[in-house]
């Protein structure tokens, strides 16, 4: 994931640099609005100069599951979505994971004991875990909060803050499990077609531990890059 982030930051820097002169012309000049005879300050907040309704979105993402004690789970995937107006849409995500033991689990596996019922048998203190191998999300998106940032009078960055709610299919060692997916995030538009996203999501589902049903929450964070067609 570190290589992904490095390339991602370099790519975004190139976009900002190449679009700086273009972005400077996106705002209206307050002097033109108030006139030469007026001394009152005029604040201008425009909407985006482009629309996103009914424009298919294709994106890539990479991230990690944040609340695992015995697994270190990284993931990557793709997303496909569309907004029906400027703030309501739907999205599908397909995610694959890479699972490794955490340092805590490796430490547990190094502790070897003789089985109480069979002293000739050696066992470890390994924890019972159920690693996640993949996720598929079908969610609705609501993005009612909108703004923009002016970076040192160099470039304008349009921003959406959004929430997500829907269903997920989580693939684990126990098979495909239905989950409830709830989250939110922030999107940064660098021009009419390209945007970056920071996304937080929780997938809540029931798995079996020690022979009993147990509720599990898988918290994820990811960064992504998306392209709006049309």
Image: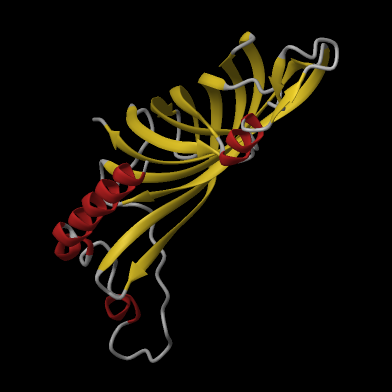
Name which quarter of the figure residue 224 lies in: top left
Screen quadrant of the C terminus: top left
Looking at the picture, how far across and down is residue 51, in whole percent?
Answer: 34, 41
Name which quarter of the figure residue 223 lies in: top left
Q: Decide: is 122 above or below 229.
A: above
Q: Decide: is 198 above or below 105.
A: below
Looking at the picture, how far across and down is residue 9, in whole percent?
Answer: 28, 53
Left or right: 162 in relation to 19? right
Left or right: 8 in relation to 161? left
Screen quadrant of the N terminus: top left
Left or right: 31 in relation to 139? left
Task: Give the residue at x 59% y 22%.
Answer: 131
Task: Give the residue at x 26% y 52%.
Answer: 12
Residues 83 and 41: in front is 83
Looking at the picture, how far across and down is residue 190, in whole percent?
Answer: 28, 52
Residue 163 in view = no
Residues 73 and 85: in front is 73
Task: Give the residue at x 66% y 19%.
Answer: 179
């Amino acid at each position: 994931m570190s290589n992904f982030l490095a390339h991602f930051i370099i790519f975004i820097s190139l976009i900002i640099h190449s679009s700086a002169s273009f972005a400077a012309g996106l705002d209206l000049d307050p002097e033109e609005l108030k006139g030469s005879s007026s001394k009152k300050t005029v604040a201008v907040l425009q909407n985006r100069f482009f629309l996103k309704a009914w424009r298919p979105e294709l994106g890539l993402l990479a991230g990690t599951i944040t609340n695992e004690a015995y697994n270190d789970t990284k993931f990557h995937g793709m997303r496909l979505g569309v907004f029906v107006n400027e703030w309501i849409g739907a999205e599908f995500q397909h995610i694959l994971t890479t699972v490794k033991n955490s340092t805590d689990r490796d430490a547990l596996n190094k502790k070897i004991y003789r089985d109480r019922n069979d002293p000739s048998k050696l066992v470890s203190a390994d924890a019972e875990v159920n690693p996640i191998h993949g996720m598929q999300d079908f969610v609705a998106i609501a993005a009612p909060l909108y703004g923009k940032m002016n970076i040192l009078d160099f470039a304008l960055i349009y921003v959406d803050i959004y929430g997500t709610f829907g269903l997920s299919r989580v693939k684990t060692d126990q098979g495909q499990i239905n989950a409830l997916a709830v989250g939110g995030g922030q999107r940064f538009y660098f021009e009419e077609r390209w945007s970056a996203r920071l996304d937080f999501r929780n997938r809540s589902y029931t798995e079996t531990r020690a022979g009993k049903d147990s509720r599990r929450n898988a918290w994820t964070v990811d960064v992504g890059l998306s392209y709006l067609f049309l």
